[in-house]
Amino acid sequence: MDTYRLRRLLSRLIVRLGCFVLLWNCAGSDVDETPEPDDPPMQAASGPTVVNPNLAVADELGALSGMNKELADAVLKKRPFLNMEALHSVVATHMSHGEAE
């Protein structure tokens, strides 16, 4: 066997032995490997609640601030709303201008 093949064989043997030693050492590790989250959990937005007036049920509409039963019923009866102006016209009949905005 020439020296080139011998060096190549020894290099492969050393690499394989090194990989074996690494795997052997990692197998008995007591380290907790649970990843830590990078970002804190998202919190609910504190802004206004947004619902789709064409899909919302009466309970969802009733939970909105400033909404009363008569207005919720009117919204349910006038659906579908094709734009915000159509919705605003229903809301404006049950609220003052300032409340509707």
Image (tube, rainbow, N blue to C red):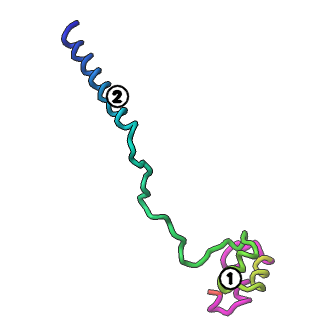
Amino acid tagged 1: His
User: In the displayed structure, does residue 78 sit left or right of residue 34?
Assistant: right
Q: Main secondary structure of the magenta part?
A: helix
Residue 80 part of the magenta-drawn span: yes
- Above or below residue 86? Residue 33 is above
The quarter in which the C terminus is drawn is bottom right
Q: Which residue is mark 2?
A: 20
In percent of width and height, residue 95 lies at 70, 90
The N terminus is located in which quarter? top left
- From the image, state whether disc 1 or disc 2 is nearer to you: 2
Q: Quadrant of residue 61?
A: bottom right
Query: Which x, y percent locates residue 97?
Result: 65, 92
Dot 1 falls on a residue whose secondary structure is: helix
Number of numbered tags placed on the structure image: 2
Give the crowd class for mark 2: few <14, some 14-19, many >=20 residues within 10 Å.
few
Is 90 magenta? The answer is: yes
- Residue 88 bears which disc, if any? 1
Residue located 67% across and 74% down the image: 83
Amino acid found under the numbered disc labelled 2: Phe
- Which residue lies most toward the right here? 77
Magenta stretch bounds: 77-99
Give x and y (percent) for residue 39.
43, 61
Sequence-first disc among 1 and 2 = 2
